[in-house]
Image (cartoon, rainbow, N blue to C red):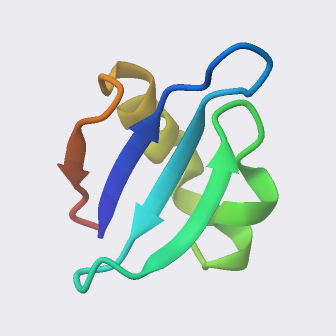
Amino acid sequence: MYIIKVKGVAKIPDYVQLRDDRFTLLAYFRVDRPEKHLDKIGLGEKQAYIMDLIKDLPFGQILKLEL
């Protein structure tokens, strides 16, 4: 799974993309509202870990997530 953090512009907030190994989009959510999106794809229990990674991830960089 891959994480990409996308920088918002003007009134558009920052977003996060979660993609699988074939780079298919699994989730797309605002950085400040991940709860229901992570629950929907079965990663609700890993929310704290994922959000810690996202907090330190520079915009535009792709991070491979090993769960």
Along the horizontal axis of the image, is 42 left or right of 37? left
Along the horizontal axis of the image, is 45 left or right of 10? left
Q: Is residue 41 above or below residue 58?
A: below
Number of on-image labels: 0
Instruction: Please identify the residue farthest to the front as the structure is shown.
Output: 10
State the residue at coordinates (48%, 75%): 25
Across and down, in percent, residue 40 comes to 72, 76
Q: Nearer the viewer, residue 20 or 52?
A: 20
Q: Nearer the viewer, residue 8 or 67?
A: 8
State the residue at coordinates (62%, 78%): 41
Across and down, in percent, residue 54 comes to 42, 34
Q: Is residue 24 above or below residue 59?
A: below
Along the horizontal axis of the image, is 40 left or right of 55? right
Q: Quadrant of the N terminus?
A: bottom left
Across and down, in percent, residue 48 comes to 54, 41
Q: Quadrant of the C terminus?
A: bottom left
Q: Is residue 14 above or below residue 51?
A: above
Q: Kindly indicate the quadrant of the structure image that contains residue 30.
A: top right
Q: Kindly indicate the quadrant of the structure image that contains residue 65.
A: bottom left
Q: Nearer the viewer, residue 32 or 4?
A: 4
State the residue at coordinates (53%, 45%): 16
Q: Kindly indicate the quadrant of the structure image that contains residue 27.
A: bottom right
Along the horizontal axis of the image, is 19 left or right of 14? left
Instruction: Please identify the residue farthest to the top as the structure is shown.
Output: 10
State the residue at coordinates (45%, 62%): 18
Across and down, in percent, residue 6 comes to 47, 36
